Amino acid sequence: NAGVTQTPKFQVLKTGQSMTLQCAQDMNHNSMYWYRQDPGMGLRLIYYSASEGTTDKGEVPNGYNVSRLNKREFSLRLESAAPSQTSVYFCASSPLGQKNQPQHFGDGTRLSIL
Amino acid sequence: GNSVTQMEGPVTLSEEAFLTINCTYTATGYPSLFWYVQYPGEGLQLLLKATKADDKGSNKGFEATYRKETTSFHLEKGSVQVSDSAVYFCALSDEGSSNTGKLIFGQGTTLQVKP
């Protein structure tokens, strides 16, 4: 089982460039999430999609946009990258987005903004 | 709002030592609680969970008990191995958000086990 697949695994951008991070899951999950991980801060939610056709802001949405392309795919876009967006980005999914259901994570995208 | 606080690391132990990683939380209502583990270069994996007060989650020799009276969910293992070296995250579900399953994470605790 592939689970949650993120592409690319690594990327270096210059300030002002744009980029889309891709995420796909093959578990038929309804809910998908994007987090960023920064040293000493744990993971913080950027955006989530509780079900196909819906997206909502999380804790740190500024500078990002998302698209729930279909049930499998949830992409994260940086329109104009800034050095503060240097981070490791994780995509996750869960079956129904209920509080007692764990999330399944991809291996992350390591993004550096110069 | 809801929050999770973990003990600061890194935690360095010798093989076969006893492990405790403290986790306390602030939440309204009745959240579910989780421990995730992250091995170097990988994503997070669920280690264990508990969904109501006094539940004990367990997996791979790790245990944690949901203590509502102390708002805690401490992770324990009786005898750690070198292969347990990783970053451990405590998390709670955002119980106030219906059917979203959003997680709030602690800052993570790095565990290093030496032979």
Image: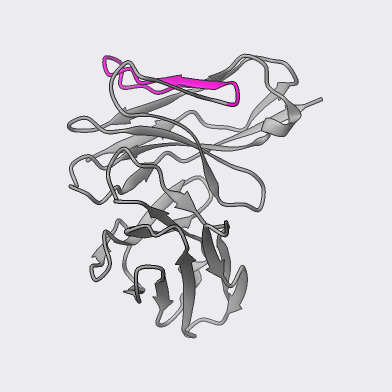
Q: Quadrant of the C terminus of chain B?
A: top right
Kindly report the secondary structure that dominates the magenta region of the rendered protein.
loop
Nearer to the camera, B22 or A23: A23
Query: Left or right: B32 with respect to A19?
Result: left
Give the residue at the far bottom of this rendering.
A17
Q: Residue at x 17, y 31 (%)?
A: B29
Q: Residue at x 49, y 53 (%)?
A: A105
Q: Residue at x 63, y 70 (%)?
A: A10
Query: Left or right: B6 with respect to B20?
Result: left
Magenta segment boundaries in residue numbering: B60-74
Query: Left or right: B65 with respect to A99?
Result: right
Give the residue at the far right of this rendering.
B115
Magenta stretch contains residue B92: no
Query: Left or right: A38 with respect to B40?
Result: left
| Quarter of the view holding residue B33 | top left
Magenta stretch contains residue B61: yes
Q: How is the image coloured?
A: one colour
B96 to B12, vertically: above or below: below
Q: Residue at x 35, y 42 (%)?
A: A101
**Residue B3 image position (x, y, % from top left):** 31, 37
Nearer to the camera, B60 or A8: B60
Q: Quadrant of the N terminus of chain B?
A: top left
**Residue B59 image position (x, y, % from top left):** 54, 26
| Quarter of the view holding residue A54 | bottom left
